[in-house]
């Protein structure tokens, strides 16, 4: 019964997120507060701009992570395969959705060795919720999640607000940091920690860095609001009212990114949460991100076909390349030093 409830929850989430008017945060990401200084004389070959980077020793053709999206529902099989096709074709990283259901009921729904077969040359990141890594079974769950898809790293997602708002959510979060520290010590792959759309503060980022987390996805507010999603699923008007009060909760993506990068300039960061296009991606890199992540923005395309998912990310990469060209940035390292001007005055970056 519990497994059936989890699967239904995943199906509900897919249905709601596929209709952005029902799921989007009322917060803006903060990227619109910044504008690149245009370079009218780039002295570059547009086609020669180098967007390549690496993640956990695997090469990437562009600094893009297909962010954790869906797991547990049978329909997720095709979505994950389409996303894996896009990752392999374009040389991008891919994080899978939560593997909790696959671990607990054995129905992997595409989260299996077939995913690595489709995407043999790119980083694949396994994924578990923070509540699943705590306790005696936590390390075993994590090892199985990694082995299930031959992953290069494990993402642990932090979603306290969502858990607080959903019926049957995990309410006891004591000991999570110690559980993350154990994974860092005992797993054979790096551990990445991400939020799911409310952002990570400098204080939390520093605590994660102190226990040895390899990378942080700040996953700020401005994209999908899981409070709004849970409000759509609420069984009573009272529960809906509780959830909707938090629809504008969280740290805007650009703010979270900038503050965490200032606090921890040497830790690798992923910027996700409302990345709308390649210009947002370029701004994120200039603000301190090593990679940018997208999830909800590609979901409808991934639901349609692998070709549609590929076309979506190809467009984003083209936009990112042109942003580099028009800032005089020959590569990502140069883009990190491109001038960003505040729209409403203040110091430039």
Image (cartoon, rainbow, N blue to C red):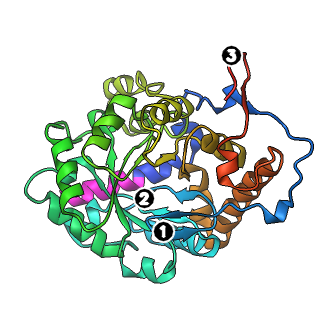
Residue 166 position in % (x across, y down): 30, 38
Closer to the camera in the image, 236 or 110: 110
Q: Furthest-right residue in view?
A: 41
Disc 3 versus disc 2: distance between alpha carbons? 40 Å
Local crowd size for mark 2, using a 10 Å CA cut-off: few (<14), some (14–19), many (≥20) = many
Disc 2 versus disc 1: distance between alpha carbons? 8 Å
The residue depicted at 48 percent of the width and 68 percent of the height is 80
- Viewport quadrant of the C terminus: top right
Question: In this rendering, would 288 be left or right of 227?
Answer: right
Residue 75 position in % (x across, y down): 45, 67
Q: Furthest-left residue in view?
A: 136
Q: Looking at the image, do the residues carrying marks 2 and 1 touch, with CB atoms under 8 Å apart?
A: yes
In the rendered structure, find residue 70 and report the number of the disc placed on it: 2
- Most frequent secondary structure within the magenta stretch: helix
Against 186, residue 121 (above or below) is: below
Local crowd size for mark 1, using a 10 Å CA cut-off: few (<14), some (14–19), many (≥20) = many
- Number of residue marks: 3
- Residue 277 appears in the picture as rendered: no
Element under label 2?
A: loop
Element under label 3?
A: loop
Among the two numbered marks 2 and 1 on one chain, the one whose residue lies closer to the N terminus: 2
User: Which residue is under mark 3?
Assistant: 346
Closer to the camera in the image, 322 or 117: 322
Magenta stretch containing residue 48, yes or no? no
User: Which residue is under mark 1?
Assistant: 80
Q: Nearer the viewer, mark 1 or mark 3?
A: 3
The residue depicted at 31 percent of the width and 50 percent of the height is 213
Residue interval drawn in magenta:
1-11
Question: In this rendering, would 2 be left or right of 209?
Answer: left
Among the two numbered marks 1 and 3 on one chain, the one whose residue lies closer to the N terminus: 1
The residue depicted at 52 percent of the width and 44 percent of the height is 271
Element under label 1?
A: helix
């Amino acid at each position: 019964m519990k497994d059936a409830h989890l699967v239904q929850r995943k199906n509900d989430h897919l249905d709601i997120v596929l209709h952005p008017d029902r799921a989007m945060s009322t917060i803006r990401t903060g990227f619109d507060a910044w504008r690149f200084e245009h370079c009218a004389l780039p002295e570059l070959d547009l086609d020669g701009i180098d967007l390549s980077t690496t993640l956990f020793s695997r090469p990437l053709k562009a600094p893009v992570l297909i962010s954790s999206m869906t797991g547990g529902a049978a329909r997720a099989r095709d979505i994950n395969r389409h996303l894996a096709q896009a990752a392999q074709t374009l040389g991008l990283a891919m994080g899978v959705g939560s593997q909790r259901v696959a671990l607990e009921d054995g129905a992997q729904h595409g989260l299996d060795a077939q995913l690595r077969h489709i995407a043999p040359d790119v980083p694949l990141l396994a994924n578990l919720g923070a509540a699943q890594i705590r306790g005696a079974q936590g390390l075993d769950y994590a090892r199985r999640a990694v082995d299930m898809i031959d992953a290069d790293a494990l993402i642990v997602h932090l979603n306290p607000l969502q858990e607080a708002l959903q019926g049957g959510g995990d309410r006891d979060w004591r000991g999570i940091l110690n559980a993350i520290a154990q994974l860092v010590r005992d797993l054979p792959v790096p551990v990445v920690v991400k939020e799911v759309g409310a952002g990570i503060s400098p204080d939390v980022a520093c605590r994660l860095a102190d226990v040895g987390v390899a990378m942080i996805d700040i996953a700020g507010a401005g994209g999908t609001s899981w409070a709004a999603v849970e409000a759509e699923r609420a069984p009573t008007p009272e529960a809906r009212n509780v959830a909707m009060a938090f629809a504008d909760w969280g740290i805007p993506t650009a703010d979270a990114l900038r503050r965490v990068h200032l606090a921890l300039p040497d830790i690798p960061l992923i910027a996700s949460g409302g990345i709308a296009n390649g210009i947002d991606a370029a701004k994120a890199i200039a603000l301190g991100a090593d990679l940018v992540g997208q999830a909800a923005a590609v979901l409808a395309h991934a639901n349609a076909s692998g070709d549609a998912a590929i076309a979506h990310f190809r467009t984003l990469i083209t936009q990112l390349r042109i942003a580099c060209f028009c800032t005089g940035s020959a590569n990502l390292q140069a883009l990190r030093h491109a001038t960003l001007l505040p729209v409403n005055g203040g110091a430039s970056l």
